[in-house]
Amino acid sequence: MPVRSIHSFSKLLIALTVLISAQVACAADSLIDHASLELGSGPDVRIVRLAAQSDWKAHWLVGGGRAMSGYWDASIAQWRGTAYRDVAGAHQNITSIGLTPVFRYGSEGKTGWYAEAGIGAHVLSRVYNNAGRRLSTAFQFGDHVGAGYVFDNRWDLGIKLQHFSNGGIKEPNSGVNFVMVKLARPF
């Protein structure tokens, strides 16, 4: 494994350790009540994402056993591009830190099927330039739509379409898209 890859992997492990430690510390105070692991893929780029969620503990549009609710999602992710500067096989590693408010429509008991959507702010460790797609700023908006199923309030399995873009702040802004699979668990 090249030294650069080991260095990037080490930084990711340190960040993950800090995030997990913070989750455990805050769990006692009910600030953070869920943690998730997500894996995703897009054209010539892969992503691994860890996140902590904090339920808003509020319901709107209640009726028929269904309701709108929401949560905060704080995340750290590692992107790996496989065509850096349009060179096949050249890698680009990027760390992303984000905070997203997410609205979820599902059962009032928070089990069974749900649909969700969110848009938040993300900061990238460097500007993305991979496979002909470029983002000209490190600040990005991350929006997603997804669906999933919560099993007995213990496991949440979901899929989502994730899009990153700077919203036209600066060009070029070709955006980056991922299909993500999520596994979450409450504390």
Image (cartoon, rainbow, N blue to C red):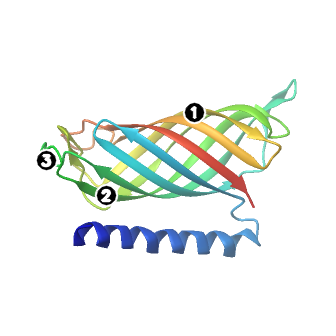
Q: Secondary structure at mark 3?
A: loop
Q: Amino acid at mark 2?
A: Ile
Residue ID at (41%, 53%): 122
Q: Which mark is residue 146?
A: 1
Three-letter code, disc 1: Gly
Q: Which residue is mark 3?
A: 85
In the rendering, at what x and y percent does residue 144 appear? 50, 37
Q: Could you give the CA–CA distance between mark 1 and mark 2, rounded to whole angstroms?
A: 24 Å
Report, in whole angstroms, how far the alpha carbon at label 1 lies from the one at label 3.
Answer: 31 Å
* Residue 126 vs residue 20, the one in the foreground: 20
Q: Is residue 72 left or right of residue 123?
A: right
Secondary structure beneath disc 2? strand
Q: Is residue 5 above or below residue 127?
A: below
For residue 163, side relative to residue 7 (left or right): right
- Nearer-the-camera pick, 178 or 6: 6
Q: Position of residue 26 (x, y in %)?
A: 69, 71
Q: Quadrant of the C terminus?
A: bottom right
154 to the left or right of 120: right
Type of the residue with mark 3: Arg
- Residue at 85% x, 39% y is 109
Please name the residue that numbered disc 2 is placed on.
94
Tell which circle, 3 or 2, labels the residue nearer the N-terminal end: 3
Give the class, few, some or many, for how many residues have Cα within 10 Å of label 1's Cα (few <14, many ≥20).
some
Image point (26%, 59%), residue name: 126
- For marks 1 and 2 on the same chain, the one whose residue lies earlier in the sequence: 2
Q: Residue 131: image x %, image y %?
A: 19, 39
